Image (cartoon, helix red, strand yellow):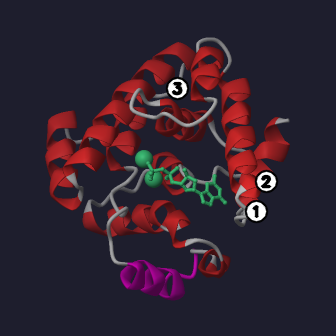
Amino acid sequence: MYQTREDLLEFVRPHLKQSRFEHTVRVTDTAVKLAERYGADVEKAEVASILHDFAKHKPKEELKSWILREEKLNNDLLSYHHELWHGPVGAFMLKDELQIQDEEILSAIAAHTTGKKDMTLLDKVVFLADYIEPGRNFEGVEEVREIAENNLNEACLQSLVNTVQFLTNNKRTVYPDTIHAYNALV
Ligand code: DGI
Ligand code: FE
Ligand code: FE
């Protein structure tokens, strides 16, 4: 159904710095384990994870023009930190460039940074894998890794609590979808 893991990794490699590529491999391995543990589609988890940071290093202006041009992309993104743009824009870029049409995969890529209301099993797997991959050292990540051993929803919730705490402690804006994700899980 999909290209192989190796083909997809070679596709993204030139778009990523070496450290980001290594992060991508760790997210993928983590997501595959979570998918197996929680009964998500393992192949889709693998594809979405390999591609999740595809747009991470695209110029801000290029991401911005996609948001302005693509009507399905919420323009309110432009009022929030540009760090949040690579997920939703990346999903649309991949739809064009790789002919990825699977809405579940595109949704998991789009929501991987902020989360969203009513996340699917696959959305949660990719979101959590990005947060707990073994290279991460956020404050509180070890607790989330432990919770992730047996409760996917609790682990997503704790990662959202940590992120919202981090953002508010630093008086940074919190994108509404992150609050919606938190509310849906609490
Ligand atoms: O792309 P990565 O570095 O792998 O990680 P990411 O896609 O989660 O994005 C990086 C950061 O974005 C994340 O650590 C915190 C920051 N961020 C800024 N504003 C928000 C936010 N994260 C969430 N969930 N919500 C926000 O409003
Ligand atoms: Fe990301
Ligand atoms: Fe990532």
Q: Amino acid at mark 1?
A: Pro
Q: Earlier in the sequence, mark 3 or mark 1?
A: 3
Is disc 2 surrounded by few (<14), some (14 to 19) or many (20+) residues within 10 Å?
some
Is disc 1 surrounded by few (<14), some (14 to 19) or many (20+) residues within 10 Å?
some
- On the image, the x and y values in percent for residue 35 come to 48, 23
Q: Which residue is mark 2?
A: 179
Of badges 3 and 1, the one in the foreground is 1
Q: Amino acid at mark 3?
A: Ala
- On the image, the x and y values in percent for residue 59 come to 34, 77
- Is there a contact, CB below 8 Å, between mark 3 and mark 1? no
CA separation, marks 3 and 1?
Answer: 26 Å
User: Which quadrant would residue 151 be assigned to in this image?
Assistant: top right
Q: Residue at x 57, y 41 (%)?
A: 123
Q: Is residue 162 left or right of residue 23?
A: right
Q: Is residue 176 left or right of residue 146?
A: right
Q: Decide: is 98 above or below 79.
A: above
What range is drawn magenta here?
Answer: 60-72
Q: Which residue is mark 3?
A: 40
Q: Which residue is mark 1?
A: 176
CA separation, marks 2 and 1?
Answer: 5 Å
CA separation, marks 2 and 3?
Answer: 24 Å
Q: Residue at x 71, y 53 (%)?
A: 178
Which of these two is toward me, 183 or 6?
183
Q: Is 46 one of the magenta-colored residues?
A: no
Q: Predominant secondary structure in magenta?
A: helix
Q: Earlier in the sequence, mark 2 or mark 3?
A: 3
Report whether residue 173 is seen. Answer: yes
Q: Amino acid at mark 2?
A: Ile
